[in-house]
Image: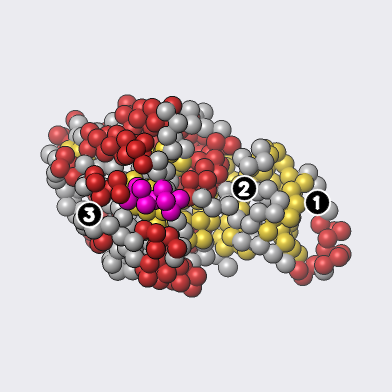
Amino acid sequence: MITIIKNGHVIDPASGRDGIYDILLEDDRIMKVEAKIDENAITSKVGKESCVVIDASNQYVMPGFIDLHVHLREPGLEYKETIKSGAMAAAKGGFTTICPMPNTKPAIDNKYMIEYLLYKAKEDSIVNILPVGAITKDQTGNQLNDILGMKKSGMKAISEDGKSVMDTKIYREAMRLAKEADIPVLAHCEDKSLVGNGAMNEGKKSKELGLVGISNAVEDVIVARDILLAKETGARLHLCHCSTKDSVTFVKMAKDANLKVSAEVCPHHFTMTDDEIPSDDANYKMNPPLRSKEDVEALKAGLRDNIMDVIATDHAPHGEEEKRLSISEAPFGIVGLETAFALTVTELVNQGYLTPMQLVEKLSYNPAKIIGVDKGSLEEGKIADIVIADIDAEYKINKDEFASKGKNTPFHGKKVRGKIITTIVGGKVVYPFQ
Ligand SMILES: NC(=O)N[C@@H](CC(=O)O)C(=O)O
Ligand SMILES: [Zn+2]
Ligand SMILES: [Zn+2]
């Protein structure tokens, strides 16, 4: 099967290409990237029926996005999301590879669960799935999992996401094993004793709504601890959903000291402040919470200056009834797969914080490097995971159009620019859905 993507604006950090090119795919591989590929010469050779031409005029052609931070809820909480529905949401959002976190029921905490996830993914998922395994048994923080065995079964990273491993000794041993296995540690940074019953950012707004606050130190204390442990163990540390100004400062210090530290920011954390929470509406509740203007500015500057490497969604679907509860009672988390690209274009590219090339670095090239897969590149010979998007298309986000089962977003009705047109995984069009 031959596919030719014509006339698109190719943005590819791996080759440095940033201009109009044609791309030729043969089966699952990228064969040629050239200024002009003559489709007539090719169709006359292979026949019209085995050649698909995609016109990408006025559209961007990028390596498929890679989301290091997704919650799929299967097994155990399929009413919130399944592997199938989450993968469809990913494809619709331009993501060709996703890394589901292990906080399912039961947790992904042994090699059989890794094997189960990979088997289910093969059956149900239209995008690539790279499993993340839990650090401790049942994520209870007491007993270390078989990290080396899980890696052998296909695990690509470890994480206790949903919480931090508070026992520093157990965590340090996990980091040592991650280093031995040559996989990254994806760190959810939250001091359990400091957070208490906190439900939103601590500040004027939490007082106004009468809710218990979550201070910046809840995150910062563990960010600092984890960086120190990365220094001691030599492990590759990736800090999830950074939300505070001091997280950016600590990441910069770690990089200046040549530590193997990388960091992600979620679209909601650079798009909205806690002041913009209009009422006690749990669609604005996530962990870490929406922060102050000062924090949001620091995150945007951190992305611009390449201190922060990755934009990841922390796609966290929940049922509509659960999210109808008050902020103090509802579960933490919002969906993100189908809004990430538009929020990045609208809030960062169009506001002059990121170039389109940086957008691709943060949504594809850098995540591939961090998770250690040969993706995030449109170079000849690579697997054809590709996203085609219109960055000018203007529309209002509509949760009722999400492929995800989760409709829990604070961005319903928000006017944005940037629409995914086509998503290709291994040479096959997976969105628009076939
Ligand atoms: N981010 C969230 O608010 N929730 C996540 C857990 C997590 O990412 O810590 C979830 O699993 O729902
Ligand atoms: Zn988390
Ligand atoms: Zn998460």
Q: Is residue 184 left or right of residue 195?
A: right
Q: For the residues carrying marks 1 and 2, which lies nearer the camera in this image?
A: 2
Q: Which residue type does callout 2 highlight?
A: Ser
Mark sitting on residue 263: none
Q: Nearer the viewer, residue 306 or 275?
A: 306
Reading the image, the residue beneath label 3 is 141
Q: Residue at x 42, y 28 (%)?
A: 257
Marks 2/3 in contact by CB < 8 Å: the verdict is no
Q: Is residue 127 magenta?
A: no
Q: Which residues are magenta?
A: 174-183
Res. 295 image quadrant:
top left
Neighbour tally class for label 2: few under 14, some 14-19, many 20 plus, Cα within 10 Å: many
For the residues labelled 1 and 2, the Cα–Cα distance comes to 20 Å
Q: Is residue 396 left or right of residue 325?
A: right
Image quadrant in which the N terminus is located: bottom right
For the residues labelled 1 and 3, the Cα–Cα distance comes to 56 Å
- Residue 124 visible from this viewpoint: no
Q: Residue at x 36, y 27 (%)?
A: 249
Reading the image, the residue beneath label 2 is 377
Q: Which badge, 1 or 2, comes first in the chain's sequence?
A: 1
- Residue 105 visible from this viewpoint: yes
For the residues labelled 2 and 3, the Cα–Cα distance comes to 37 Å
Residue 174 higher or lower than 260, as above or below: below
SS at circle 1: loop
Reading the image, the residue beneath label 1 is 37
Q: Position of residue 355 (x, y in %)?
A: 56, 33
Q: Which badge, 2 or 3, comes first in the chain's sequence?
A: 3
